[in-house]
Image (tube, rainbow, N blue to C red):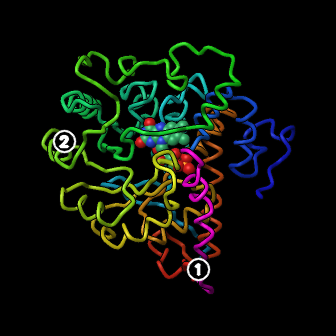
Amino acid sequence: WTPTTPLDLIASPKDAINVFDFEAVAFTKVPPAHFGYMAAGIDDEITLRANRSAFLKYQLRPRRMRDVSQIDMSVNLFGTKWKTPIIIAPTGGNKAYDPEGEIAVARAARAGGFLNVLSNAGASTIEDVIAARQGEVWFQLYATSSVEVAKQVIRRVERAGAPVLEITVDRNGGRNQETFFRLKKLDPRNCAGCHVHGIGSPQERPNYDGIDMSKVKSMQSSNMTWDFIKQVRDTTKMKIILKGIVTEEDAALCLKYGVDGIHVSNHGGRSEDGGRGSIECLPEVAKVARGKVPILFDSGVRRGSDVFKALALGATAVCVGRPYLWGLGAFGQPGVEKVMDILQTELRGVMQQMGAPSIADIHPSMVIKES
Ligand code: FNR
């Protein structure tokens, strides 16, 4: 049970006490179909729930008598220093939650100095998002059924100046999102062209502008194999991260195929049901990849203590998905800013309690798995 602030007491972002307060407000403001799309997991939503409950299996071992009067949360990713290890995960169709969509998120990232990753299922172009961010933006790609189309998108994104390409590898076809279907029934609105209602066609996705999509059979990458990574490697100088890795076997293959980073994620419980909580997948990936390439982590992160646990278990940086969408749906850009602010304030407090004044001081021994 997470107590939330009564709704009528949350008139603006500053009234929210934790990220869950934004979820409650967003539920009242976002159209039911859009909220349902955001909230949904797969089938019985077992993986979705495991993402939260699995954090309970890891407990903190704080160290005392250390000087934590100054906390430094900065991390370095591919040569860029960020003041926080908390990152905006890529999510599609942000205009479903606020008219400014991805632009509002990019402006929030600029104001707060954090990193945002633009989804290629987004409703804004990479050029517009980089202009709004006025700084580094990463790009996430769902490869289509056509390698050529993927390469053209990659070249465009590289030209626009994105230094890092995340390729999402955990969306291969089947997904049954019953929470979305159920809430959609409650939604009388006809949001023409809206990605979430499934009306928007791939051709309308702005980052595919001018690209011949006639050979694209699907926006899924059901035919993607490791050979695709080799081809991308030969196409671009951008750093390549694979998003959706949850096993040590695949982490080892990532290293074998020369990827630059690994993103441990089960897509917020939106890939397959009946899986482990994402945090339970992190140690085996870290066993293989820690110290070799940066490891990103997401799925189920809602508290600074969740971020801390992930960092201790081997993550270099930690992403959030739904929490910033709650902020966006509740209050637009200021909502995203406040969500990220709350998570950083919580992380700062946990680092103080744990005796870890910097990210480098967050040691694996500070988290123990219950036996
Ligand atoms: C996503 N996610 C996602 N991932 C991706 O690689 N490309 C995308 O376009 C999207 N779109 C998307 C939409 C919505 C509504 C959600 C909730 C999620 C997954 C996202 O990047 C991230 O992995 C999860 O959201 C992390 O889990 P939490 O923080 O939502 O629990």
Decide which of 61, 247 is in the foreground and name it.
247
Q: Which residues are magenta?
A: 42-66
Image coordinates of residue 225 in percent, x first then y, are 22, 46
Residues at marks 2 and 1, CA–CA distance in whole angstroms: 41 Å
Q: Quadrant of residue 183?
A: top right
Tell me which residue sits at (63%, 27%) in the image. Answer: 33
Indicate the amino acid at tag 1: Glu
Image coordinates of residue 24 in percent, x first then y, are 75, 41
User: Which mark identifies residue 92?
Assistant: none
Decide which of 143, 301 is in the foreground and name it.
143
Tell me which residue sits at (59%, 70%) in the image. Answer: 351
* Classed neighbour count for the residue bearing mark 2: other residues with Cα under 10 Å, few (<14), some (14–19), many (≥20): some
* Classed neighbour count for the residue bearing mark 1: other residues with Cα under 10 Å, few (<14), some (14–19), many (≥20): few
Say which quadrant the N terminus sits in: bottom right
Q: Is residue 367 above or below residue 308?
A: below
Q: Mark 1 sits on what residue?
A: 370
Q: Mark 2 sits on what residue?
A: 232
Horizontal side of residue 16 vs 320, given as left or right = right
- Report whether residue 299 is seen: yes
Tell me which residue sits at (83%, 40%) in the image. Answer: 7
Horizontal side of residue 264 vs 223, given as left or right = right
